[in-house]
Amino acid sequence: MPQVNLKDIGQRAGCSVSTVSHILAGRGQRYADETCRQVVEVARQLGYRANQVARGLRSQKTNVIGLVVPEFFFRLDEIEHTAAKHGYRVQMAAHHGDPAATEGVLADFVARQVDGLLVCYPEGDEANLSSIVAGKPTVIVDVAAWTWCDSLVNEIRAAARLATEHLLQLGHRRLVYLGPAATSATARERLIGFEEATRTAVVPLDEQLVLSLPEEKHPCEAAEQVVRAASANWHDKRRPTALVASNCEVAVGALVALGQAGLRVPDEFSIVAAMDQMIGRYSAVPLTSATDHLYQIVADAMQQLLSRLRGDESDRVLRRYAPDLLVRNSSKPYDGRYES
C-alpha cells in the first residue's frame, strides 16, 4: 500500500497542503476548529503516520501526551481534539484505582518518552509517583493538591456535603448514602462529605445508613440490586426518606429499585447525586445533583499541560474548583408523613 502523504489528506479534506501541514504539526491555532477536526479525521481515516522516529531524533520530542485516568472517564474526544489541534496525539491508560497499576502505566509512558502527562485521580504514594515521572511536565487532577507538579483540585468532598445538606435543609432526617466501597480516594472523599454533613446537622438525624456497591457490576445495575434488597426491610414508620448517591448512574439504579418498591420520587422519597452526569438530566425523574465541573477541570488541565510543553516555567499551579448544586425534580421537602 502506498504511503499516505499531506497532498492526499488535503485533497480529501478540501484544504491546501500547507494548511494540512500546519494543523498536523500543531500550528493549527489560526484555523477554524471544524477545519482542524476535518483534517485530523481524514488523516486518521487514511491511516496517515508522520515519521515520528525521524522527527523525534531532530526535536527530542514524540508529540505524544500520556493520559492516565480511572476506568470510567468522560469527554476523551475533547481531550484528543485539543491535543490534535496543537500537534499532539493522546495515548490513554486506565489505572483502575490501583496504586501498582498507576505506577506501572506512568513508568510505561515515561519509557515511551511521551512529552507530558495528564493524570486524573491517581492512586499511590506521591513520592513514588514523583520519582517515576522524574521531572517530565505533569498535570494532576485529584481530590487534593500535589507538591511536585501542577494540581487542579476537584473538591468532591464538598460536592457530597453540598448534596447532603440540601436534603437536610428540606427536612429529611433519615438518610441513606449509596456508593462504592471506600477503597479509592474519590469514594472515600464522597463518603466523608456525607458524614461531615450529617454529623454537623443543626437538627440531629434520626438515622443514617451507608450501603456499599459491589465493584464487579455496572453502577446502575449494582445500585438497583442493593436498594431493592435494602428496601425489602424498610417499614413505613421508620424507613429512610431520602438517598444520597455517589453519582447519577448510581442514582438512576436506585430510582428504578425505588419504583419497584412502590415509592414515588420525589413525592415519597427524595434522591440527590453527589456527582452530576449527563444521564441525570435525562433520567425518568431529572436528578438534583452537585456538579463538580469535571469537564471544565479536565479542559483547564489540558491547557495547563500544553502551556508547560510550550516552555512555561512559572511557579507550580494550584487551582481549586468548588461545586454547585443543580436542583431538578428528584428532591422535595419532607412532609412528615412517616414520623413514628
Image: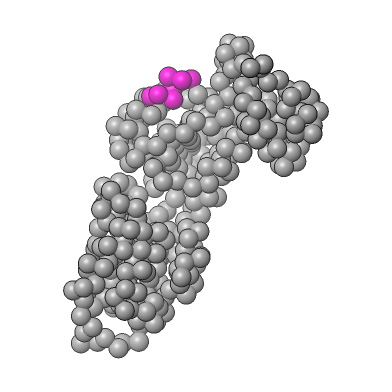
On the rendered structure, is 109 left or right of 28?
Answer: left
On the rendered structure, is 111 left or right of 172?
Answer: right
**Residue 286 vs residue 310, the one in the foreground:** 286
Look at the picture and state if 45 lies above or below 169.
above
- Residue 292: x and y in percent read 47, 56
- Examine the image and state in which quarter residue 174 appears: bottom left
**Residue located at (51% from left, 65% from top):** 281
On the rendered structure, is 70 left or right of 59?
Answer: left
Q: Tell me which segment is drawn in magenta.
A: 107-113
Give the prevailing secondary structure in the magenta stretch.
Answer: helix
**Residue located at (42% from left, 75% from top):** 331
Tell me if residue 51 is in the magenta stretch: no
**Residue located at (23% from left, 78% from top):** 239
Residue 238 visible in the snapshot: no
- Residue 228: x and y in percent read 26, 68
**Residue 318 vs residue 308, the one in the foreground:** 308
Look at the picture and state if 122 lies above or below 203.
above
Q: How many marks?
A: 0
- Residue 263: x and y in percent read 33, 78
**Residue located at (34% from left, 40% from top):** 96
